[in-house]
Amino acid sequence: MRRRIIIVTAVHGPSAPFLAEAHASLRAQELPDGWDWHWVIQEDGKGCDVAPHVPADERVTFRQGRAGGPGVARTMALAHADGEYVKVLDADDQLTPGVLARDLAALEGNPGIGWATSRVLDLLPDGSTVGFEGDPDDGPIERGAVLEYWKANGYRAQVHPASLFVRRDLLLALGGWMALPASEDTGLLLAMNAVSRGWFSSDVGLRYRKWPGQATGQAAHTDAAEHATRMSVVEARSRALESFQWGHPVSPC
């Protein structure tokens, strides 16, 4: 019996034309024997603009639902996540060759690791790429480390939530992505790090597209009052999880 990695993608009309490039980056992945991937594309809404761009591939499932933002769409996609691991891939981003195999090796080789992330490069409109400063060393990320860095560095995590690979049971236990208008992926990242060690790969795993239509490029994303509210609830959730002293993997009684 083959085992599966579920790729979860939230999409809306403006980002749908990029699905072909995301699909190409998936098809370029090589996995160990006995493994394959299943791509669940969840439209944030019920329009007519996305379906024509969904790849004709038996490994792809396309669903639509009531609009609620990317976090809601990804969480709804979990209803079709029939594998042990979940990998995030935004509709306008691209995986780099080998990243799924590296993520899988990190978690299969260490039951105490709940999630993995990779180095990310911004993909600019002219096709060039730019890296980030402050990437951690290759290897494990201890519980609480992401929150402390995030607090000390202007609410910027040292690892990118768009590159997340996570155990499905851990993702479900935390309720999926946060119910926020933005920063829902950062909220999930901090929650995971509150209860589980992670892993960072210094090999580039994602090309993160920068373009005028992306949600993080809109004025509403940087509204000061809303941003402060989002950061407050993201931190409060992480602190609360820390205080419960619950951890993944769960220790036997």
Image (tube, helix red, strand yellow):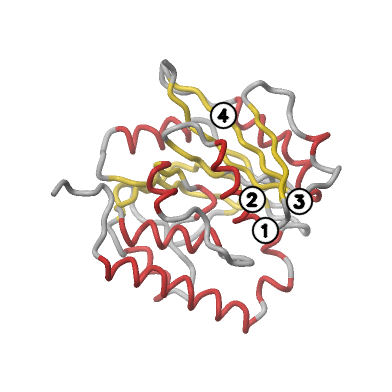
Earlier-in-chain disc, 4 versus 1: 4
The quarter holding residue 216 reads: bottom right
Q: Name the residue type under label 1.
A: Gly
Position of 41 with respect to 213 (left or right) is: left
Position of 50 with respect to 88 (left or right) is: right
Disc 2 designates what residue?
Answer: 73
Q: Residue at x 43, y 23 (%)?
A: 3
Disc 1 designates what residue?
Answer: 69
Q: Name the residue type under label 2.
A: Ala
The quarter holding residue 77 reads: top right
Horizontal and vertical percent for residue 238? 38, 68
How far apart are the two marked residues, 4 and 3, measured between alpha carbons? 21 Å
Q: Residue at x 42, y 55 (%)?
A: 174
Residue furthest right as drawn: 48
Nearer the observer, 21 or 223: 223
Disc 4 designates what residue?
Answer: 38
Q: Name the residue type under label 3.
A: Gly
Earlier-in-chain disc, 1 versus 3: 3
- Secondary structure at badge 4 equals strand
Front of the two marks 4 and 3? 3
Horizontal and vertical percent for residue 58? 66, 21
- Secondary structure at badge 1 equals loop
- Secondary structure at badge 3 equals loop
Horizontal and vertical percent for residue 32? 41, 20
How far apart are the two marked residues, 4 and 2, measured between alpha carbons? 16 Å
Disc 3 designates what residue?
Answer: 45
- How would you rate the neighbour count of disc 3 (Cα within 10 Å): few for under 14, some for 14-19, many for 20 or more? some
Q: Name the residue type under label 4.
A: His
Earlier-in-chain disc, 2 versus 3: 3
